[in-house]
Image: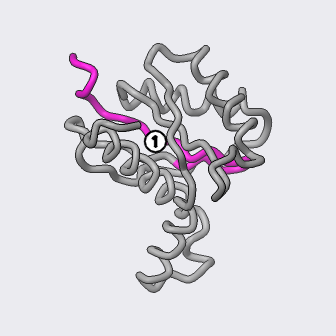
Amino acid sequence: MNEEAGRVLGVDFGEVRIGLAMSDPCRMIVSPLKVLTFKGTAKRAAHLVKEEIEALGVTLVVVGLPYSMSGQKGPMAQVVEQFAAALRELVTVPVVFHDERLSSLEAERLMASSGMSTRDMRGRLDKIAAAIMLQGYLDCQKGGRE
């Protein structure tokens, strides 16, 4: 299988919830998948995501890395990097980063514009943010830039 084929898993890592999204095999269309809730360390979260990777048969994992508007790594970046490092130790597929700047805000706006209440958004926002981040990554890859 070439490098540009196979499903890609997008991960929006949070301290309590992890949003997951997945691409189609041609890496054209992204769909929100699910939200995992966990308690504990980044290593515990990595084990949960590993199970999903194995069950879904993805060939690449893209983890959203939080940057500030100035382009600096945000305060959560270190925790996300620890999660990605733990995940890399557990899986054989590549794990890469992509800027997730504003993905949660965009997800919130999309959901609000569809008439969802804040309460309805709870538990869905993270997987929508993961989908937005992953689509951004795939679009960058099509354009030949990271």
> Residue reaching furthest front?
70
Direction from residue 16 to residue 22 in the image, left or right: left
Q: Position of residue 98 (x, y in %)?
A: 50, 40
Q: Left or right? Give the position of 139 relative to 42.
A: left
When the figure is inspected, residue 138 is found, relative to residue 2, above or below; the finding is below
Q: Which residue: 51% across, 17% down?
A: 91
Quadrant in the picture for the C terminus: top left
Name, please, the residue furthest toward the bottom. Answer: 115
Q: Is residue 144 above or below residue 43?
A: below
Residue 1 left/right relative to 23? left
Give the crowd class for mark 1: few <14, some 14-19, many >=20 residues within 10 Å.
Answer: many
Q: Is residue 93 above or below residue 71?
A: above
Amino acid type of the residue that numbered disc 1 sits on in the rendered structure: Gly
Which residue is rendered at x = 29% and y = 36% of the image?
A: 144
Estimate the x, y position of residue 33 in percent, counting from the top left: 42, 50
Q: Which residues are magenta?
A: 1-19
Q: Which residue is mark 1?
A: 10
Q: Residue at x 52, y 59 (%)?
A: 103
Residue 59 position in % (x across, y down): 35, 24
- Looking at the image, which residue is at 33% across and 43% down? 138
